[in-house]
Structure formats: structure tokens, C-alpha cells
Image (tube, helix red, strand yellow):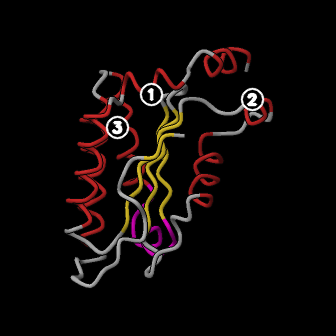
């Protein structure tokens, strides 16, 4: 636990800016926009440098934090309950995908896990934007299967990546 706390204390916002400079955040935003033109769901990408100290002391898991962020950003607030959060906790280099019940009930949990592990493998190779865009593309394939594109669909969740 001490190692984790130190890792989080030493991972600041500079680490996010270094791995996700503005140009790469723009590429990710464009990937989300292009994705959402091909299906009726919503995708949100969130990067958090490190957990707050209180969360670390409580030994909050990445999954628990991702659920908290999913709720706080109201990603569940879509017409067909098909919002998907891709959450990266940079200090742990851990990715979690939280899918709302409309899509979660249709997709095998191992498919979400496979996407997370592939993204983490890319991040280990320092390919942060490419790994993220690949994850978005893989989610797009799942969304197209269950939620085809609708011309009247409103954009319920912002496409710009969120930095916490």
C-alpha cells in the first residue's frame, strides 16, 4: 500500500500533459466524434493522474473510482442507457470500462476486459493516444452491433476527453 501511495503522490498533472498533449487529446476527441456517428451510444474518455489522498488511504480500487466518475459525470444519463466510460488512472496504469445497463447487459464482460488489457499493453509501450483510439474503435464495433446509428440521436455526453 505504501508503494501505491508514493506512486500516486509522485504522479501529478504534468504526467497527464506529458502523455496526453493537446494534439493527442484532439485526436481522441475526433475518434469519439467519428465513433458516435457510427452508432447510437455515447463514449467518454477520462484520465486521472492519481487518486485523492482520502481515496488512497481507503485503498479505493480503480473500479470503484471509475464507478464514482461514471456517476459524477452522468454518463448513465442517455436515452437508451448506453453510455460507456473509459477511465484511465495514470498512476496505476490501469484502465476500467464502465458500461451503462443498456449496453452492459448485451456485452460479455470478457470483451470489456480484453479492451482494457489491450489499452494497458499499448500504454506500457508509451502509445497512449494510439492505445486509446484503438480502444474507442473496439468499443465502436460493439456499439454498432447493438445500437445502430440514428440520425436524430442527441450527443448526451461531451466528446472532449476529461482530465481530472
- Mark 1 crowdedness (10 Å alpha carbons): few <14, some 14-19, many ≥20: some
- Residue 93 in percent (x, y) is at 48, 28
Task: Specify the quadrant that holds the N terminus.
Answer: top right
Query: Are circles 2 and 3 on residues that touch, CB within 8 Å?
Result: no
Residue on which disc 1 sits? 16
Task: Specify the quadrant that holds the C terminus.
Answer: top right
- Is residue 102 part of the magenta span, yes or no? yes
- In this view of the protein, which residue sits in the foreground, 135 or 159? 159
**Nearer the observer, disc 2 or disc 3?**
2
Q: Which residues are magenta?
A: 100-109
- Is residue 28 part of the magenta span, yes or no? no
CA distance separating discs 2 and 3: 26 Å
Disc assigned to residue 119: 3
Seen in the image, is 56 located left or right of residue 35?
A: right
> Residue 70 sits in which quadrant?
bottom right
Residue on which disc 2 sits? 53
> Is 152 located above or below residue 10 in the figure?
below
Seen in the image, is 23 located left or right of residue 163?
A: left
Amino acid at each position: 500500500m505504501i508503494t501505491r501511495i508514493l506512486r500516486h503522490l509522485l504522479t501529478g498533472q504534468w504526467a497527464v500533459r506529458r502523455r496526453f498533449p493537446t494534439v493527442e487529446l484532439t485526436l481522441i476527441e475526433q475518434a469519439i466524434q467519428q465513433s458516435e456517428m457510427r452508432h447510437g451510444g455515447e463514449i467518454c474518455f477520462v484520465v486521472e493522474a492519481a487518486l485523492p489522498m482520502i481515496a488512497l488511504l481507503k485503498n479505493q480500487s480503480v473500479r470503484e473510482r471509475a464507478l464514482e466518475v461514471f456517476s459524477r459525470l452522468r454518463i448513465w444519463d442517455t436515452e437508451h442507457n448506453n453510455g460507456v466510460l473509459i477511465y484511465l488512472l495514470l498512476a496505476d496504469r490501469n484502465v476500467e470500462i464502465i458500461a451503462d445497463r443498456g449496453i452492459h447487459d448485451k456485452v460479455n464482460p470478457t470483451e470489456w476486459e480484453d479492451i482494457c488489457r489491450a489499452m494497458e499493453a499499448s500504454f506500457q509501450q508509451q502509445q497512449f493516444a494510439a492505445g486509446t483510439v484503438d480502444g474507442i474503435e473496439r468499443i465502436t464495433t460493439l456499439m454498432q452491433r447493438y445500437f445502430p446509428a440514428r440520425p436524430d440521436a442527441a450527443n448526451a455526453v461531451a466528446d472532449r476527453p476529461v482530465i481530472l
